[in-house]
Every structure is written in C-alpha cells, then in structure tokens.
Amino acid sequence: MTRHAVTLIPGDGVGPEITDATVRVLEATGVAFDWDVQQAGENVMARYGTPLPDHVLQSIKERGVALKGPITTPVGTGFRSVNVALRQELDLYACVRPIKAYPGARNLRDDLDLVVIRENSEDIYAGIEFQQGTPECSQAIEEISRLANRRIKPDSGLSIKPISVTGSERIVQFAFDYARRYGRRKVTLVHKANIMKHTDGLFLAVGREVAARNPDIAFEDRIVDNMCMQLVLRPSEYDVLCCPNLYGDIISDLGAGMIGGLGLAPGANIGTVGAVFEATHGSAPRYTGQNRVNPMALMLSGVLMLRHLGETAAADGLEQAIADVIREGRSVTYDMKERRDDPTAVGTSQVADAIVERLRAAAVP
Ligand code: NAD
C-alpha cells in the first residue's frame, strides 16, 4: 500500500482540535500517511524569529502536500499573515473552493454543486498600496493623473490592480484541467470587463484564448454582479467558476453562506510546487480548547486532499460518511443546528467519532 508523506500544520486557536479530528477520519479510511508535523504562527516566533520558519516551507516542498489548520494573524504586531506568506512563498496561485449542498445542512438551496477557482496571487490583493497622505501616495497620484490624463483627488489612497497575461493564462488553464480531471462540463469565467477593460478585459481575452485550446470543456463568461444573482437564482446552471482574486474571495464566501456557513466550507491552495489543504474559516480564537467547533470544513478539505493524492475510493467513502452524519443530524456541532444554543449539539471530537464509526461500518464486508 502507498504511504503518503504529508506535512501536517495543526495551526493555533481551534486548529489543533479540528486537525486532530480530521487526521482521525483520514486514517480511518485505511489510507496510510506519514505525517510530518510542523508548527507555524505566533507560537514559534520566539524560537525561530519568524512565524513561518524555512523548515516548514521545506517540508511542504519536499512532500508536495500539506494539511493545515487555521493560523491567527495577531493584529498590530506587524507580522505578515502566515496564510498569505505560505501562498506567496510556495506560489499557490489557485484557490479551490467547492460549494456543495449536503442534504440536512442549513442550505439555502439543495441543488448546489459547483467549484470556485480563485486566482490567488494578483489583482487588487497584490498588496501594492499607497497610504493616503504619504509622499509616495502624492507622487503616485501625480504621476498616474498625468499618464492617464484624469484627475485623481489629492486626498485619495491608492490600491493597484495588476492582472497579467501569464497569471490569467495559468489560472484559466488550471480551471480547465480541474474540470477535466473531476468530470465537470463547463468553465464560467467571472469578470467586470465592461468597466475594467485593461485588467478584467485582459483576463477575459486570455480566458477566451485558453478556452479555444480546450474545446472539450464548455466555456462562457459572466459579469460578476450578474454572476452573484445567477448563483442565488439558478446555481444548477453553473459548474466551475474561474475568478480573479477579489471576485473569487467574495463569491466563495457567498457560496459558503449558501451551504450552511464556514463550518462546512473546505478549500485548497494549489501551485506548481505544492498543495495546501485547509478550511476557509479562521482560528475562531474564542472557541479554543472548547471542543465545540465544526471539524467538517477541514475534513472536507481532507476529502479534496485524498482526491488530489489519487485516493478516489477513500475520498468517496469519507465524503459519504460525512454526508451521512450531516443527513442524520444527530452528531453535528452547534453551527449546524437551527438554534445555536441547541443542547443536543455535540463537540468536535464526537463528530469525528461518528464519522469514524460510519467508515468502520462501511469497511466491514
Ligand atoms: P473565523 O473564521 O476564525 O471565525 C469567525 C466566526 O465563525 C467564529 O467566531 C465562529 O462563530 C464561526 N466559525 C468559524 N469556524 C467555525 C467552525 N469550524 N465551526 C463553527 N463555527 C465556526 O474568523 P475571524 O474571527 O475573522 O478570524 C480569526 C483569526 O483567524 C484571525 O487572526 C484571522 O486572521 C485568522 N484567519 C486565518 C485563516 C487561515 O488560517 N487560513 C483564514 C481566515 C482567518
């Protein structure tokens, strides 16, 4: 049997609890893992002088796959978010966020099954910003006003939105490859090209070229505002959505809300040297150590990881076991109940117990 070498980053806040629960269900599928446990975040600052030591990056580069709990970004300490740093250092340019309604969850509608693919490295999130009132900002305003022949109010702040041909090409190609690998039929490119002709317009033009090279998968585009409305009204018409950074961020949270909230929203960040699987939610610090939060978002990220590793049968089995526990509605956490103070809600580890039990029962011939 293949053993998979995977970097395991428990994270902080509720990270260690949900990671522990996820490791238990992953191992109960029968797939063998060699976990390389690595710590990152504020807790390692004193020891290594950085929240993201080189050996953590090295571990992921060597193994190519990581499962990661959330990591807190302390406010006002000046340290860069470990989550953002990981994406940059490993060039994890594609963020994959499935939006799938499991019967029994607090879904807005039950016919949701799409995947948002968000470009992770460019756009208005590239971090090129000028603070209002600084000499650099004034200089940039002057220069841009001159070049564009447009007046920018001198008391403005600026954020720059770069979208490149190479960045667009690789994310759209990624969307087609993803669609092909996972048997999906259509890629919808999301943009606002009618207004931002030289960034979103470029994204769309490059997207059309890439689509022409991938004729086996259908392609269409939607303007982002219309896309949001379509998602609420006619989600079954969509399959894989390929979005620049900002729209992808917003649409994937809209999607998370439609499938019952953050506790059920999995994710993956994928690049050329590695893939990091993590829930969409953060470290929920006020729940730390309480055995309360929902581990299913990280477990479903584990399902994505199993598929990425080619362990399709184990992925199907784990997804089915999670879906069964959701449908049954007994061993679920507070966030999946109608009322948050429902006394019948169970804890994080009891959810894992119920899923492990299902997996064991399914494995008995
Ligand atoms: P959060 O996602 O941690 O929590 C917001 C609220 O959502 C929680 O208070 C809780 O009510 C609910 N929630 C989140 N996860 C849940 C779960 N699994 N089950 C049930 N309810 C859940 O967002 P935040 O409070 O804005 O961020 C906390 C910290 O996490 C910040 O430091 C932030 O920077 C960090 N963060 C990390 C990541 C990451 O590691 N990738 C992502 C987002 C935020």
Image: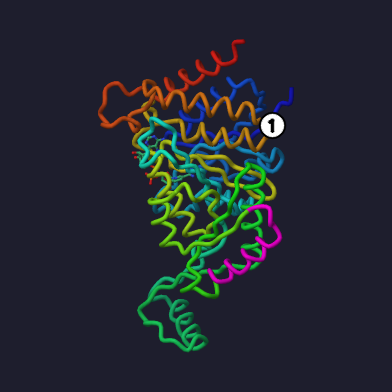
Residue at coordinates 70% horizontally, 38% vertically from top-left?
Answer: 63
Towards the viewer: 213 or 32? 213
Report which residue position mark 1 lands on: 5
What percent of the width, then of the height, locates residue 171?
62, 57
Q: Residue at x 43, y 42 (%)?
A: 281
Residue 201's spot in the image, x, y percent? Answer: 55, 71
Rendered-image quadrant of the C terminus? top right
Q: Is residue 208 magenta?
A: yes
Give the quadrant of residue 215: bottom right
Q: Nearer the viewer, residue 151 or 251?
A: 251
Looking at numbered disc 1 in the image, what kind of residue is underneath it? Ala
Magenta segment boundaries in residue numbering: 200-217
120 left or right of 152 in image: right
Foreground of the two, 205 or 350: 205
- For this orientation, the residue located farthest to the right is 1
Tell me which residue sits at (62%, 65%) in the image.
208
Q: Main secondary structure of the magenta part?
A: helix
Secondary element at image label 1:
strand
Dividing the picture into quarters, in which one does residue 228 lie? bottom left
